[in-house]
Amino acid sequence: MKNWITVYKPSIKRKDLEYVLDCMVKDKIDYGDFARNFEKRLSERVGCFDVLAVNSFYSAILLVLEALDVKEGDEVIVPSFSPQVYLNVIMHKKAIPVLVDMEKDFFQPSIEKIREVVTEKTKVLFLPYYFGYVYDPTPYLDLVPNVVEDISSVIGAKSQDLKVGTAGKFAIADFSTKNIITTGDGGGIFCNVKKNYHKVVSLNEKDYSVGDYSPRYSCYMPDLNAAMGVSQDESLNHRLRLREAIGRIYDEAIKRSRNLVINPKENCNRFYSLYPIIVKSTQKDATAYLKKNEIEAIKAFAFPLHHYLNLSKDKFPNTEYFYLNTLLVPLQSTLLKKEVDLIAKAIATMI
């Protein structure tokens, strides 16, 4: 469609390209100064010890599991309402994915369901924050030895007075085009203890002697990607303010509609990274209605993880509800006023 307004559209400005061009002019496009600068900025934003910028979100998950010594047969807990990449990495490691349901009426993994599945083989719990919503991570810390927060949509946000991403031993973030900071592709590993940072660094290729040899990964983020990340971080606060202003307009539109939006928890930041609507009609009808107005609406995930493993839907009622009733609509900071007004009008009148 000529004027199709898409959900995922990276907010790339001329300045982002200038940083990338500067990197290319210096003939230094592999891991180097831009990547280290990007890591430093992320560490300061989140408040962790240090950050390692890597070439993909898959690499971030893989290196964290390696650093936590996850082996074949170990159990890794992950909410079923999560991207498929979690399953890919866990199963490639020959670990056992243990899926849990969501809390009712909020985008948060169920504490009770996690408590029910913890065994002596449980090694790691992945704790995602969804669509810019924040919750208190501290109740999860006593349940599992190693908690890894996924802060892709909430980098720099707070729960109470705690910066998310600092509660567990590690946090991870996805820097693909779907997230508030994009490097084209890439990921970040946020380390809250010095030894953990040195552990993930030691897992990567570097110069070493014959006597020091061990198999290593090649996961460092190239400067060519990190240059865009530096520029994206510089503009993040401004872009988040624009997204919030747009999100507030959508909030008012929702009040005039028959649909719902999840309210943020008290004393927890709400980043308008994405805008999820809980639709009262079917997703098919709501999507078709928005499409008539040249507005894209998509599911949060293609499928919940329990579908891939052929597990009973009855064990994941809240995940099924979110999967069948949640639609994401466009919320880029680059939206024009006429586009925002069009989307708000469509939201208010959506069937």
Image (cartoon, rainbow, N blue to C red):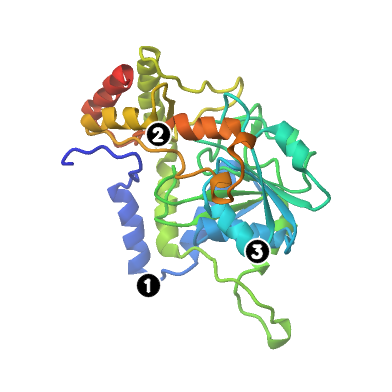
Residue furthest out toward the top: 256
Image coordinates of residue 245 in percent, x first then y, are 37, 24
Q: Quadrant of the C terminus?
A: top left
Residue nearest the observer in this picture, 125 or 104: 104
Q: Is residue 347 left or right of 118 when viewed as pictured?
A: left
- Name the amino acid type tagged 2: Leu
Image quarter for residue 241? top left
The residue pinned by badge 2 equals 328
Quote the CA–CA distance across marks 3 and 2: 32 Å
Image coordinates of residue 168 in percent, x first then y, are 71, 44
The residue pinned by badge 1 equals 27
Q: Quadrant of the N terminus?
A: top left
Determine the secondary structure under disc 2.
strand
The residue pinned by badge 3 equals 93
Image coordinates of residue 38 in percent, x first then y, are 50, 54
Give the mark nearer the N terminus: 3 vs 2. Answer: 3
- Name the amino acid type tagged 1: Asp
Residue at 53% x, 36% y is 130
Image quarter for residue 227? bottom left
Image quarter for residue 314? top right
Quote the CA–CA distance across marks 3 and 1: 36 Å
How many C-alpha atoms fall within 10 Å of the one at disc 3: few (<14), some, or many (≥20)? some
